[in-house]
Image: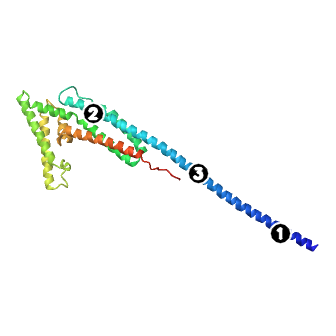
Amino acid sequence: MASELAIAGVGLIGVALGSAATFVAALVQRKGSQAQADATYRAAVTTAQVQYAAAMETQNRQARRQTYVEFSAAATELRAVERTLRRECGRWWYGDGARPDTETLFAPLRALKASYRTVELAGPVSVLEAAGLVMSQAEELVDLYERAEIPRLENQLWEGREDSDPARAQACTLAAESLAELRRVAAETPDHARTHVFEGMSTEVQSLAVTFCQAHEAAHLRFRALNDMFTDEQSTLVVNSAAFVDGNYTLRHRELQECFEEAAEDFVRIAREHLNDTQPSIGPA
């Protein structure tokens, strides 16, 4: 009886050990399956992230391209309107036709500003900087047209030197001489010295500043004396316009026009380089 119990006990122990071994094997298998499942899940998540990022990259690239196209188109429209206005001003400066409406530039400039704000959102920095240069050059060019009356006034002044009225011809001659002297002095005077505030200036610069102020006042008085030709506002416009006093208004206009067109061309080049960049900006999170 005792031996039978012993044999039975040994059998139970064997069964228990076998069950334990089976359980451990099941645990190992389960852990292996779980690890494989986790790896599969992580791979699926990574793939989904990459696919989503790729889709977003494509969408963003398309949106950026549209933004760049709209900004470039706005710059082209402003350039076309400005060229037409420049031809009209050229005729008017020499007495052909009425004063052109320089406000025709405002609508395309507003459109360019609106397009610039979308470029700010789209980026990147290199394209945004190029767009910013286009914007600043466009604003400076449009601002110059606020003084578009100046060449016409100067032409009237030169024509007045040949006036049949000796007194008026003499007054125009003196005004022209004063204007020429103002330009000569301005060319020798630093920008920061063209002021009545002499604090911090060297003695030499102060002397240049005084000479400039005297030439400026003389030209202003000479122009104001031509009150039958120019209003006080027009006279002030002439002698205070840096674009005019520092040189030739037409030359300054040409410089600004060329700078604006070059900036617009640079923007297109930089935008194209960015859009054609084959290096992906995507990857797993």
Q: Nearer the viewer, mark 2 or mark 3?
A: 3
Label 3 sits on a secondary structure element that is helix
Q: Quadrant of residue 61?
A: top left
Q: Which residue is mark 3?
A: 45
Which residue is nearer to you in this view: 248 or 52?
A: 52
Q: Is residue 91 left or right of residue 113?
A: left
Identified at 8% across, 36% down, the residue is 174
Report x, y in % for residue 217: 13, 42
**How many numbered circles does the render carry?**
3
Q: Which residue is mark 2?
A: 83
Count neighbours of disc 3 (C-alpha within 10 A) and say few if under 14, some if 14 to 19, many if 20 or more: some
Amino acid found under the numbered disc labelled 1: Ile
Residue sticking out furthest to the top: 97
Q: Is residue 148 visible?
A: yes
First along the sequence among labels 2 and 1: 1
**Colour setup of the view:** rainbow
Q: Is residue 274 left or right of residue 22?
A: left
Identified at 36% across, 42% down, the residue is 268
Report x, y in % for residue 65: 42, 41
Q: What quarter of the picture does the N terminus occupy?
A: bottom right
Label 2 sits on a secondary structure element that is helix
Q: Which residue is mark 1?
A: 13
Which residue is nearer to you in this view: 7 or 181?
A: 7
Amino acid found under the numbered disc labelled 3: Val
First along the sequence among labels 1 and 3: 1
Q: Is residue 79 left or right of residue 58?
A: left
Q: Is residue 226 visible?
A: no
Count neighbours of disc 1 (C-alpha within 10 A) and say few if under 14, some if 14 to 19, many if 20 or more: few
For marks 2 and 3, give the CA distance. 56 Å
Label 1 sits on a secondary structure element that is helix
Report x, y in % for residue 79: 30, 35
